[in-house]
Amino acid sequence: MSRSIRVAACSPDVRVGELSSNLERIRDAVSAAASAGARLIVLPELATSGYVFRDQDEARAVAMTRGDERWSMIQDALPADAVAVVGYCERDGSDLFNTAAVLTRTTRIGDYRKSHLWGAERSIFQSGDSAGAVFDTAVGRLGVAICYDNEFPEVPRKIALAGAELLALPVNWPAVPRPEGERPPETIQAMAAARSSRLATVIADRSGTERGVEWTEGTTIIDEDGWIAAEPADGAAIATLTLRDMGDKSLPPHNDLFVDRRPDLY
Amino acid sequence: MSRSIRVAACSPDVRVGELSSNLERIRDAVSAAASAGARLIVLPELATSGYVFRDQDEARAVAMTRGDERWSMIQDALPADAVAVVGYCERDGSDLFNTAAVLTRTTRIGDYRKSHLWGAERSIFQSGDSAGAVFDTAVGRLGVAICYDNEFPEVPRKIALAGAELLALPVNWPAVPRPEGERPPETIQAMAAARSSRLATVIADRSGTERGVEWTEGTTIIDEDGWIAAEPADGAAIATLTLRDMGDKSLPPHNDLFVDRRPDLY
């Protein structure tokens, strides 16, 4: 048995420090993805704020709380049966976090705070206290991780073992060297993780450059066998994924990706 | 700081059930790789016996003990400073194991028994009781896993965390469907695992077919950044790998592949 779900990974034109106009562009991207039939819509890491902050003060100026009234701009653009995952700069008291909000039209399902901080992020953000998270949503049991999190094989594995049916992965991947003709290394890692755990993965990356940082433009949808289901066109990747029944990790006739694990030996 | 090591992954013409002639072909492959300067020489899984056994009796007929005198055929072909990793069908009392021997000219460094059994292997072999293994050798601290073992991300990770400087991976990969232009999925998983843990990986696969099973012909050398260093020509892949100092997992200026792990959260 299997089911289909239409998913989108959006890469709107995020501009560092421009919270209001970023929210408008996210809203427009969500509307367009919803019109194209997507019911899971993933936006990049720190999509509301941009990434390359000069200092913590600049990040604080574009941070949002979970209760910020402006979240409704994005939520109102969602159909009733859709879920959006949106990276943002979260303010909680005096602390800042690199967080992904999981939203529906009427509900804030939850928030996940990145727990593997890249580069200079430690000078801006506190670390989250879970390695990825899994939320029950209208589109299924949804895993969420952020960028560098997914380069630790423990993270997508843990999310899959927690019963996630697919993974939303907001990222800001700075371009790194790679041999000609090769995919970005982070994409290869996500393909491998997807296949190892039969965990379809929806990756929303940035495009262009920001303050001298060139983005990988790795927005990609990976199916549950680890293959590329869609790459971006017009700022979004959209695909209809076929997902086997939740928890079906069988490899007939003899094997099973999860049953064959040897947790006693790890 | 870094050092270089020349490695070979050999894919001799293994024939199921033909122990004596397989040993000769392994010896010749080891000699050729040594002549080409290789100091780590990896042979496929079950290279002495072939893979597609009709039943356990057939496997038992071509099994070897660790003390078998014929191991000297291979050892005598090794230069004094070289290490070979050879997959074989091991007999220990009444039990059979899918094992890799780690050999020098004068010493049997150790044996690793596959612990994640694929397909019908359970009807032939007992399972090993460790998830990969690490041996101190003349070419460095050497990880060993066998085929399906490496598709569990826990295994290469555990080997790397145990201090392996590189991974020898004997395999027999049956060809599976993949989109046109894509690498074999097992290669993608090995590239990702290599990059995640900075663990260069030397993969020796079969070629051709055996009793209707088509092999992937995935013999490949992967460097410690996860990129392809060599693919086979004339039955072997040979490359000179540059390895950073043992245990150096740093990603300057801010990160480190191992220090950034959050084992408290996994």
Image (tube, coloured by chain):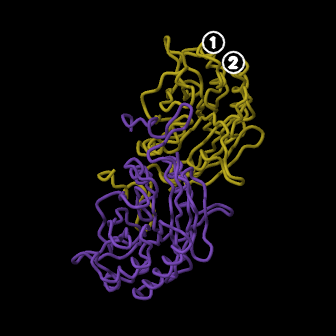
Chain colours: A purple, B yellow
Mark 2 falls within which chain? B
Disc 1 crowd rating (10 Å Cα; few below 14, some 14-19, many 20+) is: some
User: In the rendered view, does B22 fall on the left or right side of A8?
Assistant: right
Disc 2 crowd rating (10 Å Cα; few below 14, some 14-19, many 20+) is: many
Kind of residue at badge 1: Ala
Kind of residue at badge 2: Gly
Residue at which label 2 appears: B17
How far apart marks 1 and 2 lie (CA) works out to: 8 Å
**Residue at 70% across / 17% down in the picture?**
B20
Farthest residue to the right: give it: B234
- Residue A110 to residue B118: above or below: below
- Residue B234 to residue A117: above or below: above
Asked whether B241 or A159 is in front, the reply is A159
- Residue A225 to residue B208: above or below: below
**Residue at 47% across / 72% down in the picture?**
A43
Pinpoint residue B189: horizontal percent, then vertical percent.
56, 48
Same chain for labels 1 and 2? Say yes or no. yes
Farthest residue to the left: give it: A93
Pinpoint residue B122: horizontal percent, then vertical percent.
52, 24
Badge 1 or badge 2: first in the primary sequence: 2
Find numbered disc 2 in the image and state the secondary structure of the residue it sits on.
loop
Circles 1 and 2 in contact, beta carbons < 8 Å: yes
Q: Quadrant of residue B215?
A: top right
Find numbered disc 1 in the image and state the secondary structure of the residue it sits on.
helix
- Residue A68 to residue A97: above or below: below
